[in-house]
Image (spheres, helix red, strand yellow):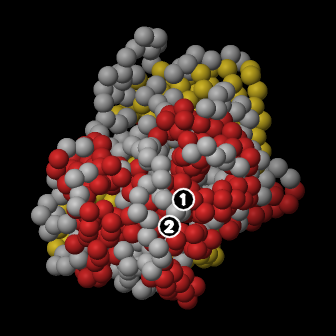
Amino acid sequence: MTWKGLGGILRANGPGEQGRAEAGQNVSEDESWSARKTRWMNAAHARAASFSRPATAFSTTPEPRTIGSFARGRQITGGNFLFAGFLVEAPETGIWDLPMPDESFEAELHGFTWLDDLAAVGDVFATGRAQEWTHEWVRRFGGGKGAGWTPDLTGRRLIRWINHAILLLNGQEREASAAYFRSLATQTIFLSRRWKAASPGLPRFEALTGLVYAGLALDGMDGHVGHAIRGLARECATEIDADGGLSTRNPEELLEVFTLLNWAAAALQDAGRMPAAAHMAAIASIAPVLRALRHSDGGLARFHGGGRGLEGRLDRSLATSGVRGAPQNGLAMGFARISHGRTSVIIDAGKPPRPEASANAHASTLAFEVTSGRRPLIVNCGSGATFGKSWRRAGRATPSHSTLGIEGYSSSRLGEAGMVSGKEAELLVDAPRDVAYERDEVDGGTRVALGHNGYSESHGLVHMRTLHLGYDGRSLRGEDALVAPNTPDKKRFDLAFDRSKLAGVPFAIRFHLHPDADATLDMNGMAVSVALRSGEIWVFRFRGEVELTLESSVYLEKSRLSPRATKQIVLSGSAIEYSTRVSWSLAKAQETPSALRDFAMDGALAVN
């Protein structure tokens, strides 16, 4: 039995905390007093809930709404468990006997989202695994033991258990069915008492949605539904702003919240009950924001710790919501979107999240992503959270984004520590106080003009960026400038210039490429050709006193064991005057036929 992570393959001799210890993890390291207290309270309430009156049946027939991945289900039935950036290879081992290389790996197991994947396979072997592992969880952890007794994980687990009840109960003995219902009741009582202990935002939405599901589905548990409806309404009113965004500005997190709200609303309406007005208003306000954060290939923009989202989830959630309409033209959760022809551009045009909401936020102000048809072209590196602390920190820095950065500095700095889910995390500090944005329809396309003062205090410089996408979607023109706009800024720039021994303030404009984009230097190093798998070729050119290089980069995906190697286009220079400007362009080398069908498919699930 082995587990594999960023550091390679390590042998693990036993399950649970022993395996985690061999992976070099101290399970109690950095655990605060408040985190220990929360854990103890969860365990106490879980044990107390186990003595409550059990449910005996479903009062309504549960309808599955969660959809898993067939490829991932096949991987699990083959004994390859890929969770939280770790792969445990154990074809002859039950899921609860696996070594736990990390707490996040263990949490994903207890959340039971893998039930969706086994249900997607649906054969006899996958069904047997689902039944065996679920009933084994009841035997081992049903009395309140184990890492799964947190409000968010319990809500996530209840949703899956109820969604897949027919699969889990089919052909089971009466004793196993009774234990299953008894555990469902225990978890429901626990949630009714502990949902407020979940962190605000996504964890609390998961807890409350699970409570809605269980209250509606289980015989004798309907008394909890009213409390859950009111709780969801309060969370919608406090966590979703008037424009349909979250304070974290994480697009994937917004999608997960939107999906949960849709599930809860559908379950209530199917049972003849109306969701609260604030609940439905939140769904209506989030839908256009998500449409604005969607690239032309259907994936989400990757900003502030979020990924592209599970395959197909965004389209399904938007269809389920019933909310029609085009994406917003203005800023959506602080992001600007331009889309013409086959090309979409999404830009971080808002202030970074507030410090208290910035534990997963990135220093990505004015960074952008470009997608052509089904093919991502310009990207950000993404979140390195599943690859360890060093990668997590690196992924949050400005050089990991497609924007301009002053060498050695990020537009927002990582500073003081805050608590996230009981653990310390670095928050964004010294963030830009002013972020400007304007949009115009000019010169045969859409132009956005942006700026931020994140380097004002340190260097007296403001970063200004202009992007222009033609109406045919075939050319993107840009200009980046570093400007000292007033007398105090000019004095700060003079001090920074003196510190550099008159060499100037070094900067780099980075354009990270997707791993599937093949880039080569052309025209004696004065241009870069980028070929996409669709057959399109884009050519990058520039003007200004900068040096063009094609350098190594990484693409960080939580579904993989290690960062994917890729390339980045870098324009390097030094600001020696109060105004330094660099122009660049990215254009298709030839027209793309309007009827082009992009048949090339990416790997469904990769582990390397």
**Please, is residue 22 above or below residue 182 in the view?**
below
User: Which is nearer the eye, 440 or 52?
Assistant: 52
Q: Residue 530: horizontal and vertical position, in percent?
A: 40, 30
**Please, is residue 435 above or below residue 82 in the view?**
above
**Please, is residue 389 above or below residue 127 in the view?**
below
Q: Is residue 261 left or right of residue 605?
A: right
Q: Is residue 580 left or right of residue 553?
A: right
Place residue 501 in its image quadrant: bottom right
Q: Are marks 1 and 2 in contact (CB under 8 Å)?
A: yes
Q: How many marks?
A: 2
**Label 1: element kind:** helix
**Residue 12 visible in rendering:** yes
Residue 188 tag number: 2
Residue identifier under label 1: 215
- Crowding around mark 2 (Cα neighbors within 10 Å: few <14, some 14 to 19, many 20+) is many
User: Which is nearer the eye, 357 or 577?
Assistant: 357
| The N terminus - image quarter | bottom left
